[in-house]
Image (cartoon, grey):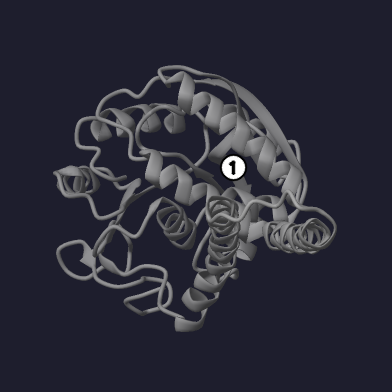
Amino acid sequence: MFNEEEVIQHTYERLKKVMDGCGDSYELVFVNDGSRDRTAEIMREVSSRDEHVKLVDFSRNFGHQVAITAGMDYAEGEAVVVIDADLQDPPEVILQMIAKWKEGYEVVYAKRLKRQGETLFKKATAKMFYRLLSSMTSVEIPTDTGDFRLIDRKVCDVLRGLKEKNRYVRGLVSWVGFRQTMVEYVREERFAGETKYPLKKMIRFALDGITSFSHKPLKIASYIGFFLSFSSFLYLFFVLFQKVFTSWTVPGWASIVGVNLLFNGIVLMLLGVIGEYIGRIYDESKDRPLYIVRETRGYSDAESGGENTGVRKDNDYVR
């Protein structure tokens, strides 16, 4: 959840209706990713009257993928379903996922047939990203899927052991393997509020996905560098030939400046690609926690008043 006060009550009601109808025991773990509105306040009140509801409240906004990680850290069930609070992913699909899980599958991901309420630009860029990621990685990441999925307890435990900071959870789920299948659904228009993934965040998310599971950008940089060096070497012979054997060379600076700008731009672009990987190495070397929890609600080891600061399972404030 991030600034979802307009929709979170409806999300809770739909989730509760679905899970009450599944016939199994359940818990609803709501992770508040540093909301600045009344989202956490609403869920504290809900947690106080519904024993199925638990709240994990971050000290600030740590990001969507980290919030998913926290949810998996705190979930106790035999299977865990990840779903965003904006109701674009219909909770009713969870029943189909549970049915597939009971057939023996350990990961059940939801594949979008349609994306209602989204612009043509977002649909086109999303489609292009998934195809690009698929072509650049050795891990088979299903196209047209998000983080809406069910994972078995053993898969959840494996994912909890993966400590990288720049996380791309749907890629990690594909990387760990296990028996996987899909269910199909139509993604609905956002119930209320506005998207939490503007273009800037989408680009950053795409970079995390590509750099987390592929070294091909570095290889492409090497190929481009080699090609440009070879082309420059051939061009040098051409210039020398003109100077020695012809009289039609025209001295000037325009072509030199143009070529320099082109090559300098390419060099800076390649340095940027390398910098993305170095930046991720830097993040890993700092070894800071993924998130910090302000309080939790609804857990049995909570302090008086139904809240507990810090990470419940590890008896620590951070993960």
Front residue of this view, candidates 104 and 130: 130
* Mark 1 residue element: strand
Position of residue 149 measured from the top left corner of the image (x, y, whole percent): 57, 40
Residue at image x 67%, y 40%? 132
Give left or right: position of 196 versus 153.
Answer: left
> Which three-letter amino acid code belongs to the residue tagged 1?
Leu
Position of residue 286 measured from the top left corner of the image (x, y, whole percent): 45, 82
Residue at image x 43%, y 31%? 20
Front residue of this view, candidates 56 and 35: 35
Q: Which residue is mark 1?
A: 150
Give left or right: position of 205 versus 192.
Answer: right
Residue at image x 37%, y 79%? 315
> Which corner quadrant holds the C terminus?
bottom left
- Compared to residue 144, the image places residue 303 above or below, namely below
Position of residue 237 measured from the top left corner of the image (x, y, whole percent): 83, 62
- Compared to residue 146, the image places residue 155 above or below, namely below
Front residue of this view, candidates 108 and 232: 232
- Badge 1, how many Cα within 10 Å: few under 14, some, many 20+? many
The residue most toward the front is: 247
